[in-house]
Image: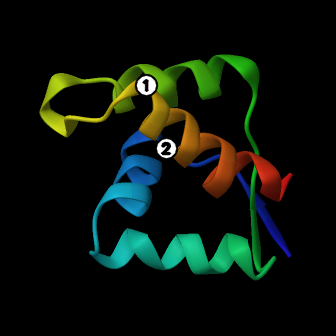
Amino acid sequence: MIRAVLDTNVVISALLFSGPPSQLVSAWQSSRLRPVVSAPILDEYIRVLAYPKFELTTTEIRSLIGEELLPLH
């Protein structure tokens, strides 16, 4: 298994869009990749997901982080 600190832009692209970074989601769901996340990095992910251009509610952000990213640690 690969452990990696992922750039915020890569994580946002993986979670929200269907381009090549989206393949990371299946990689971390299948335990081929383990994202390494600290509290400041998590804060940055949440802050960026809250940008108006993404049009995500607080509930949607919590769901993305809580269901897609954090359970994998």
For the rendered model, the colour scheme is rainbow
Location of residue 2 by image quarter: bottom right
| Residue located beneath label 1 in the image | 58
Location of residue 21 by image quarter: bottom left
> Where does the N terminus fall, quadrant-wise?
bottom right
Amino acid identity at mark 2? Asp
Q: Secondary structure at mark 1?
A: helix
Q: Nearer the viewer, mark 1 or mark 2?
A: 1
CA gap between label 1 and label 2 equals 21 Å
Q: How many marks?
A: 2
| Residue located beneath label 2 in the image | 7
Left or right of residue 25: residue 5? right
Pointer 1: residues within 10 angstroms few (<14), some, or many (20+)? few
Q: Residue at x 43, y 40 (%)?
A: 60
19 or 5, nearer to the observer: 19
Dot 1 or dot 2, earlier in sequence:
2
Where residue 68 sits in the image (x, y, percent)? 62, 56
Where residue 47 sits in the image (x, y, percent)? 42, 19
Left or right of residue 50: residue 70? right
Where residue 7 sits in the image (x, y, percent)? 49, 43
Looking at the image, the residue that sits furthest to the left is 53
Where residue 4 sits in the image (x, y, percent)? 71, 55
69 or 3, nearer to the observer: 69
Amino acid identity at mark 1? Thr
Pointer 2: residues within 10 angstroms few (<14), some, or many (20+)? few
Q: Residue at x 86, y 51 (%)?
A: 73
Q: Secondary structure at mark 2?
A: loop
